[in-house]
Amino acid sequence: MKRKMVIAMALTMMLCGCGKADSNSAKESTTEKTTATTASQEETTASETTTGAEETTAESETTEASTADGEDSTASEDEGTTASLHNDLFEGLYCDKTDRKDTLSIDCTNDELYTVHISRKKSDKEVIEWYFTGEFNGRQVLNYENCVKSTMTVGEDGSVMSGTEYTDGTGYIQISEEGTETGLVWHDDKENAGAKNFFIKQ
């Protein structure tokens, strides 16, 4: 009888031991699964964060590129507008075909009115100048009635003196051709000063 009880107790203890082992195994398995799930969630979160960051960076780069393109386009438009404002048919510097000491310059002061300056270098110490304004007509002729002629001289001491000869000169300048070249001719009613000039645009 005692022997049976001892055997029964031994079996009971073995069963209890197995139950604890199974319970510990189950707990360890559950812990491992929880750890694996947590790691998977962290990897997913990290992946989503990285993807979001990459998308944000890509959007930022796209925005910057669009802004740069817009600025370049605006700059190009501004340059084109500036160029068109100064792309005038008559405006510029002209030199005489045979005597480059005679020069003529034309500046457009508004859409129609032009200022003309003609300079003739007589020597290193004497320069004659003519100033007048006018408008080109449909035949590419600019008539003037307000020409001012002055002479500038340089003294021995380097001082510059200027004297006005008249302020009522009349005449015109006109687009003309000489052989294969196109330039400006000057008709001066006062002294016929431009009889020998043919100005070529530089």
Image (spheres, rainbow, N blue to C red):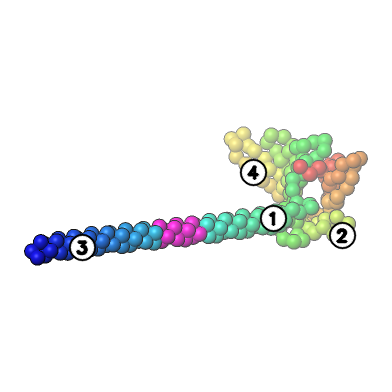
Pair 1/4: label in front: 1
> Given the image, on which type of amino acid does mark 1 rest?
Gly
Which element is circle 3 on? Answer: helix
Q: Which residue is mark 2?
A: 138
Residue drawn 34% across the image and 60% down it = 33
Between the residue at mark 4 and the residue at mark 3, the CA separation in whole angstroms equals 130 Å
Pair 2/1: label in front: 1
Q: Earlier in the sequence, mark 3 or mark 2?
A: 3
Residue 36 in picture, x, y percent from top left: 35, 58
Pair 4/2: label in front: 2
Question: Mark 3, residues whose alpha carbon is within 10 Å: few (<14), some, or many (≥20)?
Answer: few
Residue 91 in picture, x, y percent from top left: 75, 51
> Which residues fall within the magenta stretch?
42-57
Residue drawn 82% across the image and 38% down it = 97
Between the residue at mark 1 and the residue at mark 4, the CA separation in whole angstroms equals 43 Å
Residue drawn 79% across the image and 52% down it = 89
Q: Which residue is mark 4?
A: 161
Task: Report the side of 84 relative to 62 (left or right).
Answer: right
Vertical arrangement, residue 103 with respect to residue 172, above or below: above
Residue 15 is tagged as 3
> Given the image, on which type of amino acid does mark 2 rest?
Gly
Between the residue at mark 3 and the residue at mark 2, the CA separation in whole angstroms equals 121 Å
